[in-house]
Amino acid sequence: MTPKRKQKLFMFLGLVSLAAIAVGLTLYALRANINLFFSPIQIAAGDAPYERQIRAGGMVKEGSVSRNPDSLDVEFTVTDYVEDVRVHYSGILPDLFREGQGVVVVGQLQHDGYIKADQVLARHDENYMPPEVAEALEAAGYSPADFQQKAAKVAERVEEREAQEGASQY
């Protein structure tokens, strides 16, 4: 091999090494920003990592919302109608948040089995089920259509209860 070819080979190997190092460092930096989605079924099965940023979704369980009157702390249960997971959140909830509605929470799963949420995202339609939850239900052998019917019935009961509470206030 001629000296000129050796020089080109070393230059090529050096560039490939630098590119590999750059890609590796980029992936390492992005690793902390990745938050995977888990359904309550997967969390109950132990598939979700503890104390790492995750997304969890489902429906807000009827009768599970508990607010602290002295602060913005809220506790509620997210369900996929098979398993439940408790959520602790401190902050202002979205206007569309209520029992029987679909939500996605972003936070960390604690060793006590609850999620300490940093963010709560709510949807406006009681028939809405986050696509990730629907896929997880199908993977577990359940039909998301059955759960959408359950969610619609829960939403009707919640609306009736809210109407009754509103009428009793006046």
Image (cartoon, helix red, strand yellow):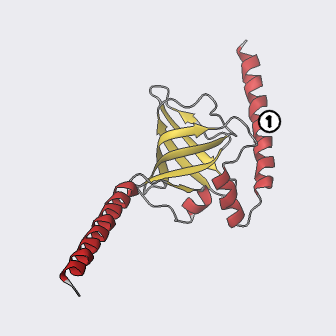
The mark total stands at: 1
166 on left or right of 60:
right
Q: Secondary structure at mark 1?
A: helix
| Label 1 crowd bin: few (<14), some (14–19), many (20+), radius 10 Å | some
Residue identified by numbered label 1: 156
Q: Residue at x 57, y 41 (%)?
A: 76
Point out residue 37 in the picture as x, y percentages from the top left corner.
Answer: 55, 55
Left or right side of 7 for 169: right
Q: Nearer the viewer, residue 10 or 153?
A: 10
Among the 4 quarters of the image, the one containing residue 143: bottom right
State which quadrant residue 124 falls in. top right
Residue at 73%, 67% in the rendered image: 141
- In the displayed image of the protein, which residue is found farthest to the left? 3
Is residue 133 depicted above or below 151 in this figure?
A: below
**Rendered position, 106 above or below 19:** above
User: In the image, residue 113 lies at what x, y percent?
Assistant: 49, 55
- Residue type at numbered disc 1: Glu
Task: Give the vertical position of 84 relative to 119 (above or below).
Answer: below
**Residue in view at x 33 percent, y 67 percent:** 20
Q: Is residue 151 left or right of residue 99?
A: right
For this rendering, which residue is in front, 169 or 78? 78
- Depth check, front residue: 135 or 14: 14
Quarter residue 120 falls in: top right
Q: Quadrant of the C terminus?
A: top right
Q: Is residue 24 left or right of residue 146?
A: left
Quadrant holding the N terminus: bottom left
